[in-house]
Image: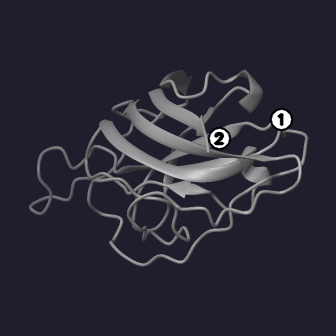
């Protein structure tokens, strides 16, 4: 586990759209819905923290689970070619599981190993905090963990530039960008 105090954005109540189509969204309540655009300035900023905009740009995912199984099961006479590919979505947390909720969540993309989300959210981070991108395969019952991509501490990140994290579980690469608000 990481040390330090968890700093996170209180999830906002969603006002629109479902999480099943492409496009840019901000965090929802984790229930699968999201609202369009950035999260605004409602993010509480505790003493010693700075507000950042964190954007997950794109990711490439391995074609199969670590076990060699397909991400999803194609049903005979119902499914179509490609249905075995994952339905990826990504959530961002400050200091991973130390945060009670994600401050950003993308929509899930259907049956693809390559995804461009371009989704951002606001997070309050202190010196030493890291952003954890949890990439999962959306399923009806249980979302399979594809990979956890962890940034360097915020003070070591080149702000405003696309940065690539490679080889996190079944995630070949994930590209993100962080800017100071």
Q: Secondary structure at mark 2?
A: strand
Viewer-proximal residue among 23 and 107: 23
Instruction: Give the residue displayed 54% in from the left and 78% down from the top.
Output: 13
The spot of residue 146 in percent (x, y) is 50, 41
Quarter occupied by residue 42: bottom right
Closest to the camera, between mark 2 and mark 1, is 1
Q: Which comes sooner in the sequence, label 2 or label 1?
A: 1
* Viewport quadrant of the N terminus: top right
Query: Where does the image place residue 121, in percent across and percent down from the top left?
Result: 54, 53
Cβ–Cβ under 8 Å for marks 2 and 1:
no
160, 64: nearer the viewer: 160
**Residue sitting at x 38%, y 57%:** 107
Q: Is residue 90 visible?
A: no
How many numbered marks appear? 2
Q: Quadrant of residue 61?
A: top left
Residue at mark 1: 127
- Image location (x, y in percent) of residue 170: 48, 32
| The C terminus lies in quadrant | top right
Question: Which residue is label 2 attached to?
Answer: 132
**Residue drawn at (82%, 42%) of the image:** 126
Q: Nearer the viewer, residue 114 or 138?
A: 114
Task: Please indicate, yes or no, whether residue 77 appears anywhere in the rendered image.
Answer: yes
Label 2 and label 1: CA atoms lie apart by: 15 Å
Asked if residue 152 is positioned above or below residue 12 in the image, the reply reads above
Can you say whether 101 is above or below 51 in the image? below
């Amino acid at each position: 586990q990481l040390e330090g105090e968890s700093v996170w954005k209180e999830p906002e109540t969603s006002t629109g759209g479902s999480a099943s189509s492409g496009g840019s969204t901000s965090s929802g309540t984790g229930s699968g819905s999201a609202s369009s655009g950035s999260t605004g300035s409602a993010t509480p900023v505790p003493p010693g923290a700075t507000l950042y905009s964190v954007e997950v740009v794109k990711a490439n995912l391995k074609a199969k689970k670590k076990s060699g199984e397909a991400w999803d099961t194609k049903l005979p006479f119902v499914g179509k070619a490609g249905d075995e590919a994952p339905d990826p979505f990504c959530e961002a947390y400050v200091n991973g599981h130390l945060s009670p909720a994600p401050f950003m969540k993308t929509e899930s993309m259907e049956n693809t190993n390559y995804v461009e989300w371009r989704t951002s959210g606001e997070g309050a981070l202190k010196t030493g905090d890291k952003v954890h991108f949890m990439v999962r395969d959306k399923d009806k019952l249980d979302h399979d963990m594809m990979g956890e991509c962890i940034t360097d501490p915020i003070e070591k990140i080149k702000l405003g530039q696309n940065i690539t994290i490679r080889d996190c579980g079944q995630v070949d690469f994930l590209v993100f960008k962080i800017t100071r608000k």
